[in-house]
Structure formats: C-alpha cells, structure tokens
Image (cartoon, rainbow, N blue to C red):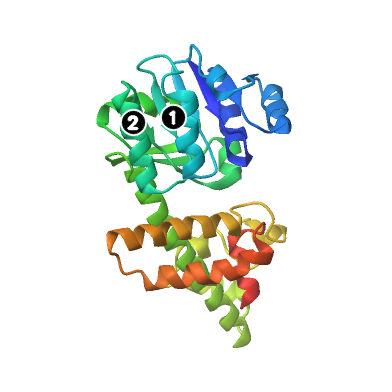
Amino acid sequence: MKIAFIGLGNMGSGMAANLVKAGHEVNAFDLSEAATAAARDNGCATFASAAEACEGVDAVVSMLPNGAIVKYVYTADVIGKAPAGVILLDCSTIDVATAREVIAEAEGAGYEMVDAPVSGGIAAADAGTLTFMVGGTESAFNRAKPVLEAMGKAVIHAGDAGNGQAVKICNNMLLAIHMIGTAEAFAMAQKLGLDPQTFFDISSVSSGQNWSMSNYCPVPGVGPQSPSDNDYQGGFASALMLKDLTLAMDAAETSGSNTPLGKHAQELYKAFAQENGELDFSAIIKTL
C-alpha cells in the first residue's frame, strides 16, 4: 500500500518508519528539514508539500500538533488532492469538535476518515506498540485498521467520528489525576519514614494500585524502568499532558460535565509546565 504520512515529529517519525518496516511505500512530508532527512534515512520518499505527498496514494495518515493545523492541512492539502475515496487517518490529539468537523468535510467530498489518537508515547511509537482509539464509521474503521496495526499493538473502535478524541482526553485526564495522587502518596510515605520500595511492594498489590504506580512509577529506582530513572527525560512531556488536560476541560465545559479533579490537575500541570514542560509528566512529584 502507498501511504502519505504528514507530520514527522517525535511521534510521527517512528510511526512512519514502522509503516515502511511493514512493507508499505511511504510518501512523507514535514516542514522540518531535519525531520524530512530522518524520514529519508528510514526509507520514506519525501516531498516538498503535503499535497504532493498525497498524489497517487491509497491512504493518508497525519500526526499534527493541534486542531487548527489539522483543519488547515486537510482542507488545503488533502481533501481534493488525495485520490478520490482513499481512507484518511488523523492520529493527532485535537478537540472533538474539530475532529468531527474535518471528518464531515472529508465525507462530504467522498472520502472515508477516522480520528485515531494514540496512547503510548515516543517509545511505543518507535517500537510499533501504540494503542489507537478510533472514531468513525464501521466501514472506515475496517479500512483504517490494517494501516494502524502496522504501527500499534491495539486498535480499538470507539464509535462514531470524534469518539477517538473523546476517549483520549478522558483517559489522559484520568491518567493525570492518578499520577498526581501516586506522587502525593509516595512523597507522604517517605516523610512518614517508609522506604519507597517497601511502599511500592505493598501498595502495588493493594487497593491503591494503579497504572502510574505499577508501570510508570514517579520515584527513581522503584518498579519497572520509567522516565523517573532517566531524570524524567523522554516519555510523555508535561507540556503535552497540559495540552490534553486543556482539551479535556474545554470538552467538560461544552458537555456540561463536572470535573473538579480534572480542573485541579490542569492547574497543577499548568504551573509545573511553565518551567518544566519538557520533563515527563511524572516529574510532577518534584513539586511535592
């Protein structure tokens, strides 16, 4: 299959490389010359514009920073430029309303399209072990699934257009809340004289167990390897967690949802990310 891939940042670079490894022919585009050069090294053909990359392809995949850019790229460079009827897959994390708007415009022009945000971070993008949360029609999901399976370990249909984004922001709001709570518990345990490893050994098999503790512990040297063991470098940047929390709070407002813990998590990450946005989100423990 020939696939256009638009957006070769930290996530998109590994995703495009895995499509090549799976045997697909990848037409890549990014505004960054360094990202474009890396894509060529990974076996992608590169193009001077997104519209050129979309010529003659069977599918288009995008991984872009925000909803405004997604809307611009699809309306200016993909819809009407990619061959009629190809499957379109946006893997960016954006607001639900924009995802639904872009998909509706694509469908009006005769394309099938899904929103398919990811979970797993840079390491999973490079390893091809991402989880995709997919919104769109059953037909569009079935067409998108083989493309997504080349980049991930799990591809799950969340329902109608925009539902992939809805799952992503709800999930990451919960993740932020769990991480802050886990960090608070470890900080208090140490101040009460508990050894962090002992607290982990007990709590990770007790009622306080959660993913942030068992798989992504914010305390160095405790639990499986995580960014805390690398001075909080790599992983999922606090600035990106703040972005997702902001999307979640916008969605809470428009849907009339009451999310007091989500709002507090947003406030904490907003303050932390001002000077530590590049650090993994588990580094929030530094504030405690």
Q: In this view, does 159 lie to the left or right of 280?
A: left
**Camera sees residue 81:** yes
Amino acid bearing label 2? Glu
Judging depth in this view, the residue of 39 and 202 nearest the camera is 39
Q: Is residue 202 above or below residue 10?
A: below
Q: In this view, does 174 lie above or below 96?
A: below
> Does the rendering let one see residue 220?
no
The residue tagged 1 is: 75
Which residue sits at x=44%, y=29%?
Answer: 75
Neighbourhood count class around disc 2 (C-alpha, 10 Å): few under 14, some 14–19, many 20 upward: some
Q: Where is residue 158 in the image (x, y as percent from the top left)?
A: 31, 43
Horizontal and vertical percent for residue 86?
39, 18
The image shows residue 54, relative to residue 228, as above or below, that is: above
Q: Which of marks 2 and 1 is nearer the N terminus?
A: 1
Please tell me in which quadrant of the rendered image residue 131 appears.
Answer: top left
Residue pointed to by mark 2: 105
For this rendering, which residue is in front, 195 or 118? 118
Question: Mark 1 packing: few (<14 Cα in 10 Å), some, or many (20+)?
Answer: some
Q: What element carries label 1?
A: helix
Q: Nearer the viewer, residue 135 or 179?
A: 135
* Residue in the picture at 36% in, 50% down: 167
Vertical relation: 163 (above or below) 13: below
The CA span between labels 2 and 1 is 8 Å
Q: Quadrant of residue 281?
A: bottom right
Left of 54 or right of it: where is 88? left
Considering depth in this image, is 214 or 115 the residue closer to the camera?
Answer: 115
Q: Do the residues labelled 2 and 1 touch (CB within 8 Å)?
A: yes
Amino acid at circle 1: Thr
In this image, 213 relative to 35: left or right? left
At numbered mark 2, what does the secondary structure look like: helix, strand or loop?
Answer: helix
